[in-house]
Amino acid sequence: MQLNKILKGLAITLPLMTLAACSSNDKKFEDESTEMDGAVVSDGTNSLNTGVVSPMDMSFDEKLAAKYGQAILQNTITFAYDQAEIAPEYRVVLNAHAQYLLDSQKAVTIEGHTDERGTPEYNIALGERRAMSVVRYLQSMGVPSSQLSTVSYGEEKPVSFSHSDASYAENRRAVLVY
């Protein structure tokens, strides 16, 4: 008789617990991502009927893009030859990363890279200057230094192995790695 009561209790409790577990979602992210720049991302209705994609249907990258703009998906900043100055077109990208870092409290490592021209010592120093240029920009946007670290690879990790101006341009970069 006692075993029968336990089995009946489990038969009722298990489906209820399963239903409760399946119905929970990340309300904080959904609430924050419902409206951005005046555009509604999701109104909480069924996306099949309205054509609106709900945050639950989005991938992590799509949620980031919806919240911070497409710029957050770009993590590489390129530089001119022998320069460590950030070009104006990358300010939007770095602003999005700064906002993401402030909201998420995550840490990021900025890798500095160069092309193969120059001595190894010079390229390590130039890679460090490029990484520090990105760090200074992010700090100017309010990101605490405790979330930022740098490493310079110089010419050691090229993206392109060709010996052309286009390949050299691809290798002159700083990369944000989360």
Image (cartoon, rainbow, N blue to C red):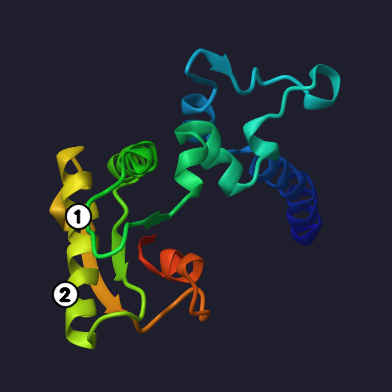
- Residue 140: in sight, yes or no? yes
Q: Nearer the viewer, residue 14 or 112?
A: 112
Q: Which residue is mark 2?
A: 125
Q: Nearer the viewer, residue 142 or 14?
A: 142
Callout 2, which amino acid?
A: Ala
Residue at the image position 80 percent from the left and 50 percent from the top: 11
The residue positioned farthest toward the right in the image shown: 49
Q: Position of residue 136 (x, y in %)?
A: 16, 50
Quarter-of-image position of residue 72: top left
Residue at the image position 55 percent from the left and 22 percent from the top: 34
Q: Is residue 39 above or below residue 123?
A: above
- Dot 2, crowdedness within 10 Å: few (<14), some or many (≥20)? some
Q: Position of residue 73 (x, y in %)?
A: 50, 48
| Numbered badge on residue 133 | 1
Q: Is residue 29 above or below residue 112?
A: above
Q: Is residue 120 above or below residue 51?
A: below
Residue at the image position 32 percent from the left and 79 percent from the top: 117
Residue at the image position 18 percent from the left and 79 percent from the top: 122
Quarter-of-image position of residue 57: top right
Callout 1, which amino acid?
A: Ser
